[in-house]
Amino acid sequence: MESETPLLQREELVSALQRDGLCLRHARENFKADEELVMFAVSQNGNALKFASEELKKSKAIVTAAALQHGPSMQYASKDLIEDRDFVLELCAKGASCLSGLDEKMKKDKEVVLACMSANGFQLDNADPSLQKDKEVVLRAVKSHGKALRFASEELLKDKEVVMAAVSENGDALKFASSELKNDRDVVLCAVKQSGDSLKHSSEEMRKDREVVLEAVKKSGRALSLAPAFSDDKEIVTIAVQANAKALKFASKDMKKEKDVVYSALKSECSAGEGLKFADPELQADKQLVMEAVRADGDALQFANALLRGDKDVVTEAVSTRPEALEYATDSLKIDKDVVIMAVKKAGDVLKVLPSEAQDKEVVLEALKTSGDAIKYVTEDLIADREVIKQAIISGGEKLLGAMVDSVETQQIIAEVIEEVERRAHWLTE
């Protein structure tokens, strides 16, 4: 039973419907018969049709808007419209996914179901079982939505033409194919060319097929994890790490020692810095390679060996890419004035990773110029400093500052500074 809610006035209802069309349920009966309001409601949420007046549930315009917004809302239309074959075909032609909202007769009507499959093949789930065995219907469905293959009959899961159509649209549809077709080279090649990760649905034999694996890693480097037989194949590993640097994790020990393979990982557009994480320790100590890694992703500094995390050139390069990478530097560089100033000028929140001895007034002021929120990381001895307070307020850290300070004396300084800043702002606008 729905909870009782006060009936809404028209003005309130308009505002409510802008946020949620289902608010129509709380409207007065005359508003539920108001075509303009109901159109607004069903355009925002098709299921609002449930609360429209019986008369408006017969309106083709209203029902069309509802079905286009949410296909299953067709179930709330009048019986006459649900059974109006021409109207349903018209809706499907417009792209409405309304099969689940139709009656059983319509779900057995091949022409109607074909039209629905063109709009959204995943609706095959709602078709009558007799049509889930119909090759023409299933082909139409999987060409629109490959994973609709899961709703096809067992017989059609063994049909190569149907399965090829499905994996061409979505490689992961291979999951639903018969065991025989998961071992069919043509089918699997077609699937991995569309989605490299679909290799996981293929047979063990196919995962040992070099051409299949090569095509898979071109689309998804992670597919290398599914083909351990090729973890030592330099061409395949190189292509995999170019697609995704994390794929280096699944390469052999020898490949992780190959400098050019690791360089390929560092040039990847996906997780480049992770390439250093899985590289051989000897390469994690290679300054030239580490410089390349932190240039691609400052956070890669965390994967460099300890000596290079204490190398000023390397850390400066990492911080220039991502200031927060200073977190991974050695303690000696976290108090290096040049490095610290460079970092806080780029991101004030870097203060949170600095030891207290690195937080002198100059560093704190530079951090606050970048972000007023950095005030929450300032040490106690500077939190009451007038210049620090002023910079925090100018940079928008006033609320945080007020919440952090208990001292009456400091609160007084804050109030004075706020007044000073406001006066100056007023003077500048006159």
Image (cartoon, grey):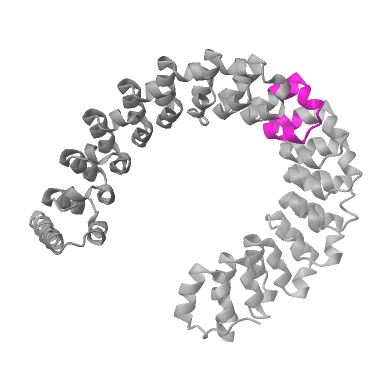
Residue 128's quadrant in the figure? Answer: bottom right
Query: Does residue 363 appear to the left or right of 72 in the view shown?
Result: left
For residue 190, above or below residue 280 = below
Query: Residue placed at 12% from the left, 63% from the top?
Result: 412
* Residue 194 location (% of width, % of height): 69, 33
* Residue 403 location (% of width, % of height): 26, 61
Q: Is residue 267 visible?
A: no
Query: Does residue 293 appear to the left or right of 341 in the view shown?
Result: right
Q: Quadrant of the N terminus?
A: bottom right
Query: Does residue 29 appear to the left or right of 162 in the view shown?
Result: left
* Residue 106 location (% of width, % of height): 83, 63
**Which residue is more in the foreground, 227 or 102?**
227
Query: Residue placed at 90% from the left, 46% from the top?
Result: 154
Query: Magenta includes 127?
Result: no
Residue 414's quadrant in the figure? Answer: bottom left
Majority secondary structure of magenta residues: helix
For residue 111, above or below residue 211 = below
**Which residue is more in the foreground, 302 or 29?**
302
Query: Does residue 409 appear to the left or right of 250 in the view shown?
Result: left
Query: Residue placed at 62% from the left, 61% from the top?
Result: 69
Residue 157's quadrant in the figure? Answer: top right
**Which residue is more in the foreground, 81 or 214?**
214
**Which residue is more in the foreground, 165 or 91?**
165
Q: Quadrant of the C terminus?
A: bottom left
For residue 363, above or below residue 66 = above
* Residue 358 location (% of width, % of height): 23, 37
Query: Residue placed at 21% from the left, 59% from the top?
Result: 405
For residue 383, above or below residue 72 = above
Residues shaded magenta: 190-214
Q: Is residue 17 visible?
A: yes
Query: Magenta includes 198?
Result: yes
